[in-house]
Image: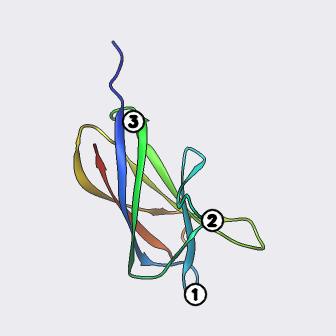
Amino acid sequence: MEIEKLTVRLIQLHCYQNDEEKYDDVFLKFNGEKIWPLDKKHEDVRIDSKHDLDVTITGLIPDERAAIEVWDHDLLSPNDLLGTMYFVPDKKGGPYTVDMNPLNESTTARYSIDWEII
């Protein structure tokens, strides 16, 4: 019997604390692929801001952990992975909120994502 796969919609990105002085140049990745923003390299994200995502991720296996990576785009050096948000979709519902796990102790950035299973 084939397992019914799930679809997750990422609703909104919340920035509670950015890593850079004024703002982070954020983009999101899933399974090594950039998923947001699609129309430009990054989004300028400031402290205490919210950004609509409207990103759909299909083909997820129920009860299997998935990860969204939060990256900071850099112009003259390699991009910085700020942290990862892990979630485990199980059945239709939501919205839920997941907090970012910082890459290391020196990462000051704090982000979360609202998401739902559709």
Q: Which residue is mark 3?
A: 64
Question: Could you tell me which secondary element the residue under label 1 belongs to?
Answer: loop
Residue 3 versus residue 107 in the image, above or below = above
Q: Of the two numbered discs 1 and 2 on the same chain, state the one appearing first in sequence.
A: 1
Residue 82 versus residue 92 in the image, above or below = below
Which label was assigned to residue 21?
1
Which is more foreground, mark 1 or mark 2?
2
- In percent of width and height, residue 35 lies at 53, 53
Question: Which of the 4 image quarters holds residue 78?
Answer: bottom right
Q: Amino acid at mark 3?
A: Glu
Distance between mark 2 and mark 3 Cα atoms: 29 Å
* Residue 86 visible to an observer of this rendering: yes
Distance between mark 1 and mark 2 Cα atoms: 20 Å
- In percent of width and height, residue 38 lies at 55, 58
Question: Which of the 4 image quarters holds residue 62?
Answer: top left
Which label was assigned to residue 41?
2
